[in-house]
């Protein structure tokens, strides 16, 4: 089917087509009308870097400007231009102040912001792990990423006051299309993706979508090798125009030799060759599997009231072995005393969510109500030999010699065999569940220019923890109030103020055997949002967060204690979108001052930076479509990441200085009709960079970052 699209005709299109048509209108000279094929419209045209619509997962107002919160949305197009393959690959460069603790490879994304560890969500489901997890989401299933700065009690029941992020997965859109992409790159990387969707019947009630991907590559470090498989089918059935049911399943499988690209040396951070590894070629590789199931039911009763119910179950497991060095060899620093450690984890989250949204008037005052309840049940089981491995496998730094035969003193098999051999009490088990009803009302005043929202969430949680037969348990009931104001002072510009509370129950115990208490936080925030010509937007925010009952690692060992308080203050700025014809940008900056304000166990820590704090983060990504008819199929990209004032993974009295991080990347694309060719070169300066770092027992630990590398992609839209 062929449609004639002009400026007026855009209004008659679907949302999916409208976004593309607006992009065409904005980026082509003297456009009066364009003829396009409706079937193949969606993915081969220039990307939109800015969207102002929030997903239903967040439950609040869909208009990002009217939300009393700093929310940043990363469209899939931005990630594709940067050729990121999963959430763990620098997607945080697109949001001010966010960064990864890059230690757990594919197992856990571990994203930090505003002095804390932020919650992971998938389709609005709280996935914050009790230990490690969930697996980093693959780009093949990601529609967009939503970063919520600060507490967000009505988007998720629990979490650090720093915020959370939500992965919106791909679902049937109603289009009929098939897209295939193949990637080739450095270190023997080969990857293939498929995105196929359409409808089953002529009545247009049942739609399907299937996303597939497979990847294999070597690493830049010796003996590294990893692969990933993703299978993600989904179905949507429209009972009528007001009622729908969507079912999704996502399977991820990872196999990799290294838990992370960690290096260690007694001589200082970044003092080893880039490809140096403590991993032996005979090491058992890590294997991880994750099964995700989502069932979402939506019902609109009328134009003012609607209901959403969602059930989800996420099951994840990983098992493998690795070498680790616990400290310096005092007799010969050139020798690394490696221990071979077995590490296994099982993680499950079951979630049930239901909420109702509606609007009504009392006189001339408009009310927007949301009320609902969240139920979440998390379990974690771990089996490891981190504290019991005793055999040393020495390795020389200056002359490493790797063996082909390994005396594996770790326990093998799976959870079933381990339980048979060692008994159930040999596992570390954590369990946490909560039920949390909530209600919020947003009133509109002054012809809808002023919006005031207030809400209350009630959360009951219960947890238990079993560490090799030593059990602790606890329960809590907490009220979390929220108050926000949003004022529209220009056509598409708002100022907002927010006061919010957060509550994060924990499972586990301190070094002296006490149950961990919930982390509580209070947040104050002011911000300005502006949408410029509906093509790009800016957000400026200032905040202060106060946390109590923070968990701190003892600087001399890895024991946990909980006597701390900390305060985070900062300024954040984000610019995203098309600032000129054919010129898309992502520019952000964050200043973060996060310090320990109370520590009864180690008072000398007061005034020290919180773990993983980065004082200055500035990121830029630019994409420009070349002008003129002959060059308009070509676009070029350039970006960089800069981090300064970095602190170690663990707070310590004698913190070692970490050098600033600067990385530059570039890319070029060619898109013609149904074919796209894209090349990205990362770390084009080939600089020797390292990430997450800390010092312990006279040994320096850090995560080595990838040297110069490229990714070349070919896309076909059939």
Image (tube, rainbow, N blue to C red):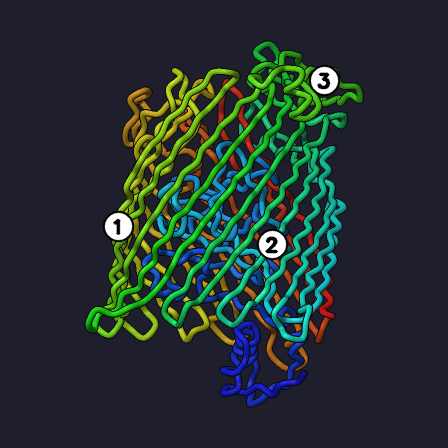
Q: Earlier in the sequence, mark 2 or mark 3?
A: 2
| Residue at x-position 53% and y-position 71% | 240
* Extreme residue in the left direction: 363
294 sits left or right of 124 in the view: right
Query: Dot 2 lies on which element?
Result: strand
Up the image or down, 137 lies above or below 518; here it is below
Residue 248: mark: 2
**Quadrant in the picture for the C terminus:** bottom right
Q: Quadrant of residue 412?
A: top right
The residue singled out by tag 1 in the image is 499
The residue singled out by tag 3 in the image is 408
Which one is closest to the eye, mark 2 or mark 3? 2
Q: Earlier in the sequence, mark 1 or mark 2?
A: 2
Query: Dot 1 lies on which element?
Result: strand
Is residue 222 at least partly visible in the picture?
A: yes
* Extreme residue in the top direction: 331
């Amino acid at each position: 089917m062929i449609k004639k699209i002009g400026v007026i005709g855009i209004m008659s299109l679907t949302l999916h087509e409208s976004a593309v048509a607006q992009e065409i209108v904005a980026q082509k000279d003297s456009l009066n009308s364009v003829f396009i094929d409706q079937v193949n419209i969606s993915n081969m045209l220039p990307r939109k870097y800015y969207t102002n619509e929030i997903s239903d997962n967040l439950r609040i107002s869909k208009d990002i400007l009217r939300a009393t919160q700093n929310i940043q949305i990363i469209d899939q197009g931005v990630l594709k231009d940067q050729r990121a393959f999963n959430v763990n690959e620098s997607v945080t460069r697109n949001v001010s102040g966010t960064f990864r603790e890059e230690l757990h490879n594919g197992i856990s994304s571990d994203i930090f912001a505003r002095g804390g560890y932020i919650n992971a969500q998938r389709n609005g489901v709280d996935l914050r792990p009790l230990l490690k997890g969930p697996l980093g989401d693959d780009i093949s299933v990601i529609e967009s990423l939503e970063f919520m700065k600060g507490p967000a009690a009505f988007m998720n029941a629990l979490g650090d006051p720093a915020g959370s992020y939500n992965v919106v997965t791909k679902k049937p859109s109603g289009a009929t299309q098939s897209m295939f992409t193949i990637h080739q790159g450095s270190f023997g990387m080969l990857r293939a993706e498929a995105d196929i969707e359409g409808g089953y019947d002529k009545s247009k009630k049942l739609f399907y979508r299937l996303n597939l991907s497979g990847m294999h590559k070597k690493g830049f470090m010796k003996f590294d090798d990893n692969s990933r498989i993703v299978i993600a089918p989904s179905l949507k059935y429209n009972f009528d125009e007001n009622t729908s049911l969507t079912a999704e399943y996502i399977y991820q499988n990872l196999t990799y030799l290294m838990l992370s690209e960690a290096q260690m040396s007694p001589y200082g951070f970044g003092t080893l060759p880039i490809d140096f590894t403590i991993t032996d070629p005979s090491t058992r590789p890590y294997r991880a599997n994750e099964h995700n199931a989502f069932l979402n039911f939506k019902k609109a009763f009328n134009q003012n009231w609607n209901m959403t119910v969602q059930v989800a179950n996420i099951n994840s497991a990983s098992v493998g072995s690795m070498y680790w060095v616990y400290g310096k060899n005092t007799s010969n620093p050139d020798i690394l005393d490696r221990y071979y450690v077995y590490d296994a984890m099982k993680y499950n989250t079951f979630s049930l969510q239901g909420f109702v949204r509606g609007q009504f008037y009392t006189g001339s005052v408009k009310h927007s109500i949301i009320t609902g309840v969240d139920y979440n049940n998390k379990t974690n089981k771990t089996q490891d030999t981190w504290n019991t491995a005793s055999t040393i496998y020495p390795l020389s730094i200056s002359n490493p010699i790797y063996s082909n035969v390994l005396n594996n003193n770790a326990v093998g098999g799976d959870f079933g065999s381990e339980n048979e051999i060692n008994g159930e009490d040999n596992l570390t088990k954590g369990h946490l569940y909560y039920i949390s009803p909530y209600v919020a009302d947003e009133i509109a005043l002054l012809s809808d220019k002023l919006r005031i929202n207030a809400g209350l969430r009630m959360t009951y949680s219960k947890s238990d923890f079993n560490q090799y037969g030593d059990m602790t348990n606890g329960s809590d009931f907490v009220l979390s109030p929220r108050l926000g104001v949003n004022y529209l002072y220009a056509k598409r510009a708002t100022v907002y103020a927010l006061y919010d509370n957060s509550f994060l129950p924990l499972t586990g115990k301190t070094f002296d055997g006490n149950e961990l208490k919930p982390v509580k936080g209070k947040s104050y925030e002011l911000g300005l949002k502006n949408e410029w010509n509906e093509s790009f937007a800016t957000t400026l925010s200032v905040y202060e967060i106060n946390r109590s009952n923070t968990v701190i690692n003892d600087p001399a060992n890895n024991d946990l204690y909980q006597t701390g308080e900390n305060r985070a203050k900062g300024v954040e700025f984000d610019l995203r979108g098309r600032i000129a014809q054919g010129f898309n940008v992502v520019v952000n900056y964050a200043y973060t001052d996060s310090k320990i304000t109370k520590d009864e166990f180690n008072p000398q820590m007061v005034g020290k930076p919180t773990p993983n704090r980065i004082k200055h983060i500035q990121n830029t990504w630019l994409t420009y479509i070349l002008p003129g008819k002959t060059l308009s199929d070509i676009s070029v990209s350039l970006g960089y990441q800069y981090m300064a004032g970095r602190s170690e993974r663990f707070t310590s009295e004698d913190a070692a200085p970490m050098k600033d991080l600067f990385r530059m990347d570039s890319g070029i694309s060619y898109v013609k009709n149904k074919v796209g060719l894209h090349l990205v070169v990362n770390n084009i300066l080939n600089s020797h960079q390292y990430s997450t770092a800390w010092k312990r027992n006279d040994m320096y630990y850090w995560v080595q970052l990838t040297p110069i590398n490229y990714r070349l992609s070919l896309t076909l839209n059939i």
